[in-house]
Every structure is written in structure tokens, then in C-alpha cells.
Image (cartoon, grey):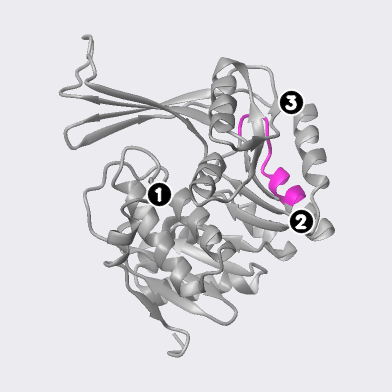
Amino acid sequence: MIYTCTMNPAIDLFSEFDTFKPFVVNRSHYEDYQANGKAINISFMLKKMGINSVATGFLGGFTGKFIESTLKEKGIGTAFVHVDGITRINTFIRTGELEYKAVNHGPEISRMSQQELLKLISGFSAADSLFVSGSLPRNVDDSILIEIAQLSRQNGFSLILDVSSKALLECLPYGPKLIKPSDEELAAFLNTDPDALSSDEEIINGARKLLKMGARHIIVSRGSKGAIYLDEKYTLVASAPKGHVVNTACAGDTMLATFIGSLIKGKGLDEALAFATAAASSTAFAAGLSSLQDVPFLLQQVHVTNKTESGV
């Protein structure tokens, strides 16, 4: 079974206004409420590809109930740890070319609830895969990521990580199956300036350092510049389609889900990377997660270059 773990989920409220001014009532002309969280988005995207998963993590209050009911309505299994407090609501306000983002902390998570989640994960076996994505809620230390990595090595399940915490580096010796840093996150992991990783070659050389530390596969997401995939044998560079960017918040989640989903469906690495890059752009060009309907069109603009032979 595929599991997706979102420890700090949210309802995302997207609103559009003609103007947005302080100290007056601003009335929107568009609004949309979406169950959100990086790994929850992965479950949604996998479902769109016809792949089942079970979503877990922490949920609380009426907002948590909304998220869980939305997942169930989509036919996605749930195994959340229910906590005191209210799962957060994030607000994204767009007016013309400007976007304002208000992101909240969410509830504090007790150590007892954390142990309940770890107990669930400790029951996963070699037949299972676990995505862990996103930020950590209040009172949850980065060390929980290392504990999960240790469980993956101990029990043999595949671990896919998309986290910005530097605790990721301490997870690498346990051999996570795949990590997906952005180019900025990669620079932070390597303690270098983002400008020092501006070219394909610089990113490839930087990502190879994480491979040597234990990561088995890496995708570096680069926004409008596409993506780079590396493992011990292959290095692939994908360009991104052009289009009007509406919301980049979920593009990386889409990329990760559709890449793994494509591999599950038997696609080769180059096809999977191309599809994932097109799908990520499709999400960036929409208000919410991609429906995947425009991916065949966007795929025509994606070019995957195999740099394995070049020795770059």
C-alpha cells in the first residue's frame, strides 16, 4: 500500500479581488476552499492517475473533519491521528498580478499523538511506500523525520521525502528511496548561496553530494526551469512548458506524485520525468491541482536531455 503523511495539513482558501485595500471591506469575486497539505496533494494526484493510497498525519477540529471527508469523497483511504485543536486555514489572496499569502501555524501536537503516528508507521512493511511531505506542526521536532527514516530501514518500506528541514541530511544514511528538494532547498542543504547553483551542471554536482550521503534517487524541482533527476546511473534534465502561472503552491507535490505514479504504471525514467514536469506546470497554470487533461498538450513542450553519457 502507498501511504502519504502530512503532519501539518490545512484548508487553503483561494480568493480573487479586483482590488485589495486596508481598513475597508474587500469583496471577492471568486473563492475556493481546498483540502490541502503536501502529501494530501500527492494522494489526490495519485487518485487522478488511478492509484490508491491512504492519507495519514494529524487532523483536528471542524477543519480536520472537512479535510478527511473530502479525501473520503474522492475514494482515498484515511488513517489520521486526531488531535486537540483546529487544523489550520491558509489564505491566498490574488488581485491583478499580486498575490498575498497568509500561512498559519496550526495546533500543537502532543508527544502522545506523535507516538501514535509512529506506531502506525512502524506497522508498514517492505510491500509499502510512504511519502512524507511538508512542514512540521508546533511541538513536533525535526527528529521525527529521522525516526521515520530509521523505521523505513528497519522494516524495509520505501520512503519518499519532500521536506525543507535540514534533518533530511540525517535521514540520508538510512537510504530514502527518493528526495525532492527545490533548487533553493538544495542550496540550503549544501550551505551554499542559491546563486551558486544556477546552472544545470552546478545543480547536478550539488545533488550528487546528497546521493553520496545515501539518497537513492533525487529530483530537483526548478519551477519554470523544469527539473533534474539523478541516481547512481542516470542524470536527466527536463525543460518546463511555458504558460501563465496562477499558483505555484502545489506544483512540486504534483511533480512528485506523477513521477512515482508514472513509474508505478511502467513508464521509463525519461517518460516519467517528462510527464511529471508537464503535470507540475499544469498545476502551476491552474487555481488548484491539475486535472491532467492538458498534460498531453504540455508534454509537447517538455524536452528531456540525457546527460548520463556526457559525464557532467
Picture disc at residue 152? 2
Secondary-structure class at tag 2: helix
Q: Position of residue 14 (x, y in %)?
A: 34, 28
State the SS at label 3.
loop
Q: Of helix, strand and loop, which one carries label 1? A: helix
Q: How crowded is mark 2: few (under 14 residues within 10 Å), some or many (20 or more)?
A: many
Q: Residue at x 63, y 74 (%)?
A: 212
Q: Which of marks 3 and 2 is nearer the N terminus?
A: 3
Horizontal side of residue 71 vs 289, given as left or right: right
Horizontal side of residue 295 vs 268, given as left or right: left
Question: Which amino acid type corresponds to the residue marked 3 in the rendered image?
Answer: Ser
Label 1 – label 2 distance at C-alpha = 26 Å
Range of residues picked out in magenta: 137-148
Disc 3 to disc 2, how far (Cα)?
23 Å
Which of the two discs, 1 and 2, labels the residue nearer the N terminus? 2
State which quadrant residue 114 falls in.
top right
User: Camera-side residue: 253 or 166?
Assistant: 253
Q: Can residue 222 be seen?
A: no
Q: Could you give the CA–CA distance between mark 1 and mark 3, rounded to whole angstroms?
A: 31 Å
Identify which amino acid the numbered label 1 is placed on: Ala
Judged by depth in the image, the label closer to the viewer, 1 or 3, is 1
Q: Quadrant of residue 310?
A: bottom left
Query: How far across and how far down the image is residue 191, in percent?
Result: 51, 60
Residue picked out by circle 1: 251
Of the numbered discs in the image, which one, if any, rests on residue 110?
A: 3
Among numbered discs 1 and 3, the one appearing first in the sequence:
3
User: How many numbered marks have been drawn onto this rendered protein structure?
Assistant: 3
From the top left corner, tell me how far across and down residue 184 is, in percent.
Answer: 43, 56
